[in-house]
Amino acid sequence: MAYIRLVINPKDDEAFKRVVNYPARGIGDTTVGRIEELARSRNKSMWEAVDELVAEAATLGDAMQKAIARKVTEFVNLIRELAVARESKSLYDFGLELASRSGILQIYRQENTPESQSAVDNIEELLNSMQLFREQRDAEIRNGEREESEQATIEEWLQSVMLMTDMDNEDDGADDRVTLMTIHSAKGLEYKYVYIAGCEENLFPSQRAIESADGVEEERRLFYVALTRAKSEAMITYCDMRYKWGNMEFSSPSRFLREIDPQYVDCEEDLSPKSGDSVQGSLTGRMGNFSQASATERRNGQTAVEALRQRFDYRFQQKRAEAGNSAPKAGAKVAPDPRLVAPIAQPRSTAGMRRINTSAAAGTASLSACPYQIGDRVEHPKFGVGVIQRIEPLASDHKVVVDFGSYGEKTLLAKFAKLEKL
């Protein structure tokens, strides 16, 4: 995430410090401290101060200083090249190139440990969220809810993710929320209700575990741990299809689901294997045949993406029919169903970026530190003139709700909103 933030806004000092030597590229704390000192003394961002460091190293003529300056320059060039790539590549392709060229994927794959594999899985899910964001935007364009020019951008994706994750820092109703944790972290704990997500072949058990009997047995023990955390009920879920490294693929329910005594299961599916089925065999129930399929295989003559679009379109039309609306004519633009479409703030241009202050103490930002006030008239490069309705402090930023008249209310982050006071 810090790499993406730096590509979007090179003047983000916090992001610069997080990634300048990650993965390790020979730029130590002393060098980072020197860059920070130069930036502070000249009232510049650390990104801009790199030029000062390179010039200083050239003046001193010290071989070691020149070597450090060369490494910093290589890092800056990498960020600049990624910034160019973001303009020409799709969201997913840009994210994958960033994860690959930065070296993050390589170091985790080389470690080859359960922890590093978990990190790779997390990166995959992050990239999948980019692909899903683009698919949702494409669907909105196809349905006439957005113009062709309103393609998904990395800025919009980042803002939507940051708005969602900042909700975790809110303190209101601390006792009325879900506790999210790994199965390993849940050992020794108990809850009245437990939800176990992602119970699918090649996910739980993982593809790596399936390669050996010991691996499957270890995953089975983990499943038992997860299941027995529930005092009253455990809700187990799996997907019929999900994104895997940017490709929509069919999924099969985990073999562990068939191993639960049926008397304890309340399920609409018949999870019993057919006669002659292998351990990884198909599962037949009211919802159809959940046989394993690769990205290139088809189910009922359709790929996973085609099946997903047909299902979405069917449900969309069904909801409209229930609301008393007739099906739209071919080619006609339809208004979005508010139950299906969530508003997404859309800053498009990166012009006018400003340095992000990193000297503030950690914790929730105060309203006094926000550059805007309720009632301010502001102008946005896309939405035009609006009036600020609400301001909410977040962990390191402010959530600004602006009424843009015909565009409606938009929720923006102060750091990235690029609002100009009028």
Image (tube, rainbow, N blue to C red):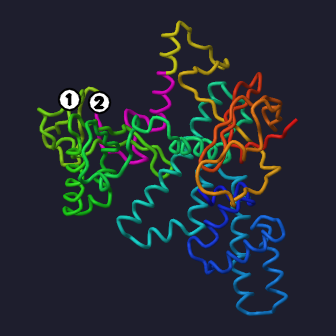
| Badge number at residue 266 | 1
Residue 361: x %, y % from top left: 63, 57
Binning the other alpha carbons within 10 Å of mark 2 as few (below 14), some (14 to 19) or many (20 upward) gives: few
Q: Earlier in the sequence, mark 1 or mark 2?
A: 1
Report helix, strand or loop for mark 1: loop
Q: Quadrant of the C terminus?
A: top right
Query: Which amino acid does the dot numbered 1 rest on?
Result: Asp
Judge depth for marks 1 and 2 and give the one in front: 1
Q: Residue at x 78, y 32 (%)?
A: 383
Q: Nearer the viewer, residue 325 or 376?
A: 376
Q: Is residue 180 left or right of residue 389?
A: left
- Name which quarter of the figure residue 59 lies in: bottom right
Q: Which residue is mark 2?
A: 288
Residue 296: percent from left, percent from top: 43, 47
Evaluate whether residue 285 shows in this view. yes
Magenta stretch bounds: 289-315
